[in-house]
Amino acid sequence: MRLIDLSHRIEAGMVTYKGLPAPLVCDYLSRQDSRAMYDGGAEFAIQKIEMVGNTGTYLDSPFHRYADGTDLADLPLEKLAHLDAVVVHARNGEMAVGADVFDGVDVSGRAVLVRTGWDRHWRTDAYFENHPYLTAAAAELLVNAGAALVGIDSHNIDDTRGRERPVHTILLGRGIPICEHMTGLDRLPTQGARFYAVPPKMVAVGTFPVRAFAVIAD
């Protein structure tokens, strides 16, 4: 078996979503300061991290959109881990990924990972503008067909040129988690991988980074 990392690195100062603050990472306890607390030459570093949940590759739970939605702590592992995955490739240059892209694709009970190739723009200004997204019709199809989770390697699963967020509204409204800002989907087969995107078990939090990855047969 092979493990395929599908997550971006998180570094201090990086911007994931334009308009949201970058993470701050510093020492709460430095190695040097810790030496006075231990014997035998032991030293430790404890970092302090300040960041918004929408940082790096992250998972949206229903609580992200709905006040009474399931938060990260209450999402069952069955919705996040060991999911049969199907990779759907958006058409080259296509911004609006419509329902027709999923024609003939069995998404029932699966993690549906939409590869747009937009991750090539990560950490550039181009990443934030005119990015690929799913249409409301595509989201409705995925809900009706029983998708377990939906992921995308783009800046947002919704069109951010307007203020509506129909795809978040539709998917999260039906309890389907969303994984955004993925990368490396080109390394996966169309079918046959197992997908994992498990966030910390945090109460009253809707979104948090994950180390998304897939397991495939070698």
Image: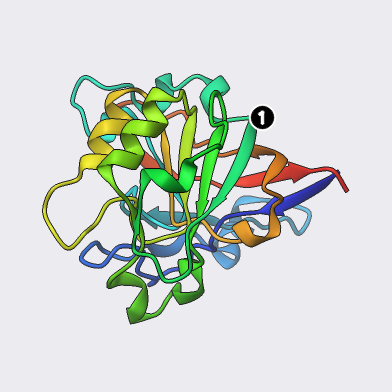
Locate residue 183, reporting x and y percent.
55, 60
Q: Is residue 28 left or right of residue 46?
A: left
Task: Please rate how many residues cluster around mark 1, counting C-alpha atoms within 10 Å: few if below 14, some from 14 to 19, many from 20.
Answer: some
Q: Amino acid at mark 1?
A: His
Q: Eyeballing the image, is 14 above or below 54?
A: below
Locate residue 184, reporting x and y percent.
61, 61
Q: Is residue 210 visible?
A: yes
Check disc 1 and report its element: helix, strand or loop.
loop
Locate residue 136, reporting x and y percent.
26, 42
Residue drawn at (38%, 24%) of the image = 144
* Figure colour scheme: rainbow
Kindly give the residue lying farthest to the bottom in the view shown.
125
Residue drawn at (54%, 63%) of the image = 9
Kindly give the residue lying farthest to the left in the view shown.
163
Q: Nearer the viewer, residue 88 or 160?
A: 88
Q: How many marks do you count on the picture?
A: 1
Q: Is residue 137 left or right of residue 31?
A: left
Q: In the rendered image, which residue does mark 1 sit on?
A: 82
Q: Nearer the viewer, residue 218 or 196?
A: 218
Q: Nearer the viewer, residue 97 or 131?
A: 97
* Quarter of the picture holding the N terminus: top right
Quarter of the rendering containing residue 72:
top left
Q: Eyeballing the image, is 102 above or below 8?
A: above
Residue drawn at (76%, 59%) of the image = 41
Quarter of the rendering containing residue 202:
top left
Residue drawn at (51%, 67%) of the image = 117
Q: Is residue 205 visible?
A: no
